[in-house]
Image (spheres, rainbow, N blue to C red):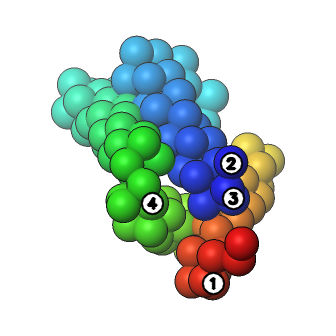
Amino acid sequence: MSLPRLYLWLSALGFIGVGIAFLFWPMPLSLSLGMPLTTPTARVDFAATYGGFQIGMGLFLLFCAIREEWTRAGVLAATFAFAGFALGRLHGLVFAAGSPGSTMYWFLALELTGAILGFAAARVLRQPARW
């Protein structure tokens, strides 16, 4: 399996897995991140953003992994999603008042890894096939 397709499969499963966890267990997960969901509005938005969006993104990436002609679009979508998460988290870490929990650094490392692997996979797609 090529790097771009492997990247898509792993990214899709990661997004879907995280999305399912946050959709079905929002309260314990939000508390573990220091984000108590104290209102119904907060719970709905948290489930939509961290659950629903992640599942939707994962399903899109899964579709892209299955349909070869969508590989490039999927790789770029996942890459920029990971890069965007990393950028937002890095900004938050730099400008946070106080010391964020160590989980934020683990997430940043995962997101940076996802972005770097994505850029590598996109680069492989730019190169002509060698037989």
Question: Which secondary structure, mark 3?
Answer: helix
Residue 16 visible in the shown view: yes
Q: Looking at the picture, does residue 123 appear above or below residue 71?
A: below
Question: Which secondary structure, mark 4?
Answer: helix
Q: Position of residue 101 (x, y in %)?
A: 74, 47
What residue is shown at x 30% (from left), y 34% (from top)?
Answer: 52
Q: Amino acid at mark 3?
A: Leu
Neighbourhood count class around disc 4 (C-alpha, 10 Å): few under 14, some 14–19, many 20 upward = many
Judging by the rendered image, the residue that carries numbered circle 3 is 3
Neighbourhood count class around disc 1 (C-alpha, 10 Å): few under 14, some 14–19, many 20 upward = few
CB under 8 Å between callouts 3 and 2?
no
CB under 8 Å between callouts 1 and 2?
no
Q: Nearer the viewer, mark 2 or mark 4?
A: 2
Q: Looking at the picture, does residue 63 appear above or below residue 73?
A: above
Between the residue at mark 3 and the residue at mark 1, the CA separation in whole angstroms equals: 12 Å
Between the residue at mark 3 and the residue at mark 4, the CA separation in whole angstroms equals: 11 Å
- Kindly identify which numbered label has been placed on residue 127: 1
Judging by the rendered image, the residue that carries numbered circle 2 is 1
Question: Which secondary structure, mark 1?
Answer: loop
Q: How many numbered tags mark residues here?
A: 4
Judging by the rendered image, the residue that carries numbered circle 4 is 71
CB under 8 Å between callouts 3 and 4?
no
- Of residue 89 and residue 62, the one placed in the foreground of this image is 62
- Of residue 27 and residue 51, the one placed in the foreground of this image is 51
